[in-house]
Amino acid sequence: MGFSSSPPRNWKGIGIAMLVVAMLASVIIVAILMLTPEDPPIGFRTPLTLDDLESEDFQLHQSQIHWVTDDELVELSDTGTVMKWHIGQKNSTLLVEDRDLHFLKASHFQVSPDLQFLLLACDVQQVFRYSFTARYLIYNLGTRETSNLDVPKADTVRLQYAAWGAQDNQLVFILDNDIYYQPGVSSRAKRITTSGRQAVVFNGIADWLYEEEILQTASAHWCSPDSMWLAYLSINNSLVPKMELPQFLGGKYPTSQHYPYPKAGQPIPSVQLFVVNLSGALHLLELLPPESFQGREYYITMVKWVGHSRLAVRWLNRPQNMSVLSLCEAATGTCTERYKVTSDFWVDMQQGVPIFSEDAETLFLPVPVKQGPRGEFHHVTMLSTQPSRKESSVRLLTSGTWDVTRILAYDENSKRLYFLSSEDRLSSKHLYSVELDSSFNRTCVTCGLQPGCSFVDVRFSPRMGHFILFCKGPGVPQVFVHRTANPRDFLVLEENRLLQDALMHKEMPLVEFRLFRLASYDLSVRVTLPPPHQCAFCPLLLLLPESPGGQLATEEFHLDWDTVLSSSLGAVVVQFDARGSRTQGLKLLHEVSRQLGSLDVKDHVALMRWLLQLPYVDRRRTAVYGKAYGGFLALKLMATAEDLFKCGTGVAPITSFRFHAATFSERYLGMPAREDAAYTMASVLEEAPHLKDRNVLLAHGTGDATVHFQHTAELLIRLLAADSNYTTQIYPDEGHTFESSQRHLSQRLFSFFRGCFEDTKYAHLLSEEDEDP
């Protein structure tokens, strides 16, 4: 049999064809890789810089959001656009274009209850932390025309406050510390009060103390749901010493602002609660405090309307160790005590607002509840509002060794109460619900609901149909709207996509959480670690809380100058919730009572000795930073623990609690006349000789209304007497938030710590050589 032969193959052509196919395949693969939105390789990322924080791509966008109905909300974006969102339809309508608000110089807005008008605050000038003055305009959403408020003086007058009432387009505004009421945008304004006096009597508006320490808002008045009644505080500072804030800039001669500021042991303002019927002849009716408070100094910490004609009022005595919740009738002024809390130390959570059922027969509030040897924790309780029923009818809805942070809302249909808590873990904060049937089943609503969202805040719609979910961390903050009945059904309001994309190209630090065992407590520690290749032996910066009870070791997103320090200089940044911090019960919270400057110092010293044992920490390069109370603590640590810190910074430090606000100081230390030793311990002034050879940076604004420049001045004169070598950064006319100088302050802090760390960059290598045999 013969063999047949095939025709010869064109190997050259085949090779060319295969090469072409390979080239096409490689082009396709490259194209796919280029279009795939994956994280850039580590080698292509760059360290975070201070300039990055100032660029537009790294800004955190936070819109102003207001519910207007149960299915609609209005949003003012950072760009100035006002949108109305229809939640059920998941779409939006443009109400005002950004160019309109920019032209009017409007930065704050409110929607009238009838959805016909916007109230715009223009040319805003900040006064204190929450208060500001502004010119107000009314924007007609139908005609797109603007008009001025019916202000008794010139159209250009600046108001201390203005807001819509509870119905239609009624208005309430404050001028010269007096209250005015306007039944509608086209009506004439009525003057409600006449006793207002600049820096003395404040009607319906908070003075510095009530704004900063008590109410934590500028408003001190409350409209009833039907707008028939108005309740307001009248705060009288006749006996309160005035503080002088010099203003150096803008003229040939400095000027000054005088405002009432009660320091520890000094007279505090007297306060009265009035109600007025807005529908007829003006008649003021005072609601009197409980009998045990009459004739004594006290605070009013919370006011809330219950239905259309009753109010819930919380009274707090000056020592802050007794609080009474009363229910008052607006028509008669009769008040009945419903719940009293006492403490051997101080009563906490005084701004918390109780929640009421629709029929106003039941109220829910967090109260201290004993939980075995761990002591008391705040838990949700339910009790009747009827005066005929005793407090023994209180029903406990939650329990455990964790704290309820805030009660938010009660859903009548599902019989569920919603609250915030860190039950899941100390560093988190989630939304929970509890069923009011016999089982009291508890559900974590937001656990796992959105990725990167374990530290949240929530705002429910008027009828509980939806809630706004503010995801604050650990991922880049985002805002969603969820349906209450089915939280998996949601709408995205803000993703901060620009910031997310920008951070993908940066070498960002890694955050881990640890527990530090101290005095039978497991205390939470947040450790921010630099990118792996930055250092093997890293400098360490300890950040301190701004006030006692502050919680720093949380999963809340953080991006600031210290993040840059970790990303670009390889620093380990540590935040610590020592004894005296919240969310771990009242026993832990009250540990620092009468012991500021003592117990808190010991806790941080113990933490530092533990941290210095970590293999990646360079004990020669350690630093501490704090502001206000944190500045006080930083200076105390620098003076008493000389071997632990190479350098430290106090920004607007409290150097003596005798100079500080009465409400703040007396809460933790008591009255100075009876607690002299506690106030002496809580002072840095006596430590000045121990700071003589320490590398310290002090930064303060001369216009700080919260922690006065006096604190730093008193320390400086003592440092001079001790012939100390220190660095000071003064900001003329700057306030406590450094609003105009924040960029410079961040650069100054970064440069100071960089110099501190680089000064001993190779010290550990020298010490290792010295130890070699």
Image: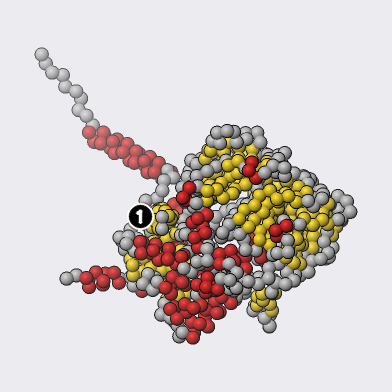
How far across and how far down the image is residue 442, in percent? 53, 38
Q: Residue at x 48, y 82 (%)?
A: 719
Residue 637's place in the image compared with 531, above or below, is: below
Does residue 743 show up? Answer: no
Circle 1: element type: helix
How far across and how far down the image is residue 259, in percent? 69, 72
Residue type indicated by callout 1: Gly
Residue 124's place in the image compared with 74, above or below, is: below
- Quadrant housing the C terminus: bottom left
Q: Residue at x 68, y 62 (%)?
A: 298
How far across and how far down the image is residue 194, in percent? 83, 64
Which quarter of the picture shows residue 731?
A: bottom right
Q: Residue at x 83, y 51 (%)?
A: 277
Which class describes the residues within 10 Å of circle 1: few (<14), some (14-19), or many (20+)?
A: few
Display colour scheme: secondary structure
How far across and how far down the image is residue 688, in percent? 47, 79
- Quadrant housing the N terminus: top left
Left or right: residue 171 versus residue 449 is right
Front residue of this view, candidates 422 and 592: 592
Q: Residue furthest left?
A: 1
Q: Which residue is mark 1?
A: 43
Left or right: residue 205 versus residue 59 is right
Left or right: residue 620 versus residue 633 is left
Q: Residue at x 65, y 63 (%)?
A: 318
